[in-house]
Image (spheres, helix red, strand yellow):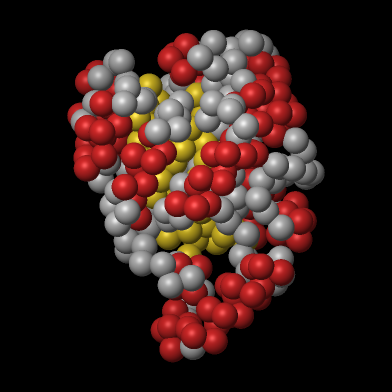
Amino acid sequence: MIKTRLTEKLGLKYPIIQAPMAFAAGGRLASAVSRAGGLGLIGGAYGDSVWLSEQFDATRGQQVGCGFITWALKKQPELLNRVLKRKPTALFLSFGNPVPFLEVIRAAEIPVICQVQTLKDAQYAINLGVDIIVAQGSEAGGHGEKRSTFTLVPEVADYISVHSPKTLLCAAGGIGDGRGLAAALMLGADGVLVGSRFWASKEALVHPNMLNAAIDGTGDNTIRTNIVDIVRKLDWPDRYNARILRNEFSDKWHSNTKGLKDALNSEAEIWQDALAKGNPLIANAFVGECTGLIHDIKPAAEILENIMSGAVKYLNKSYC
């Protein structure tokens, strides 16, 4: 058992938060993680109110949190009040300015988690008084920026220790087993945010073919690109791109975004059809570099326990 400030603040058994992965992190996954002792988050993503209601219903009363892509929530701010009525354990905001939402979240007495990709953004969020900072490195699957987990996390930890000791810190990006959790704690984090490893779980909303493609891949097979946003016609801010598993589609278009935009109508239809059918040669899996550490599909509770037991083993090793 490892107790940290994160476990104490949120009443967790394990200092592990499951990332609110868009379209993959539904109520079944979030509730399984929370039930097993971590914090499960429903991926509010781009703001589908019907989907969100369905996923909260799927938790069957298990306490979970919810995450939003902040620039997308800004377009539908009413969704926040709907989620707050569900009394989430925490609200997770990323990829945009959290300021427009902080007052109403705090009024509901819900802890605020802000994910950041740079020290500058961490400083900004810390000065706003958010409860938990998630420092995300570029190793992560899905959207992010350029900084590495291994250097960003201790840099943020050092800033927190001097300027805001009460702020909690979680590490994210490339963390998929006990070694990652142990390393994050050594870097100064109070816990970790885990995405790809839970993406490859029995409860995640992911097509089996996409899961198998990720299991067969390694970190070398991932790439950071914006072609998946172009083909999905999503207006992501320029500063962010996404880490995905390479395939025939990305090999064709990654270095030819102009050509993709010119052929967008036909390519978008082809890509979406491939996603629905689980064709990993065309649709891309949103996984991080730790895909090379994923060799099977397990229940979320077993994944959680394996990460924790592995961390204990490595933290108990003596190197002196």
> In the visual, does 128 lie left or right of 95?
left
> In the visual, does 119 lie left or right of 273?
left
Residue in the image at 35% along x and 30% along y: 112
- Percent across and percent down for residue 294 are 72, 44
Nearer to me, 100 or 148: 100
Quadrant position of the N terminus in the picture: top right
Q: Is residue 290 visible?
A: no
Q: Quadrant of residue 250?
A: bottom right
Q: Is residue 74 visible?
A: yes
Tally of numbered discs: 0
Residue in the image at 70% along x and 42% along y: 203
Residue in the image at 32% along x and 53% along y: 76
Quadrant position of the C terminus in the picture: top right
- Percent across and percent down for residue 92 are 40, 37
- Percent across and percent down for residue 11 are 51, 14
> In the visual, does 308 lie left or right of 160?
right
Residue in the image at 53% along x and 78% along y: 268
Nearer to me, 316 or 126: 126
Nearer to me, 93 or 260: 93
Q: Quadrant of residue 305?
A: top right
- Percent across and percent down for residue 171 are 47, 32
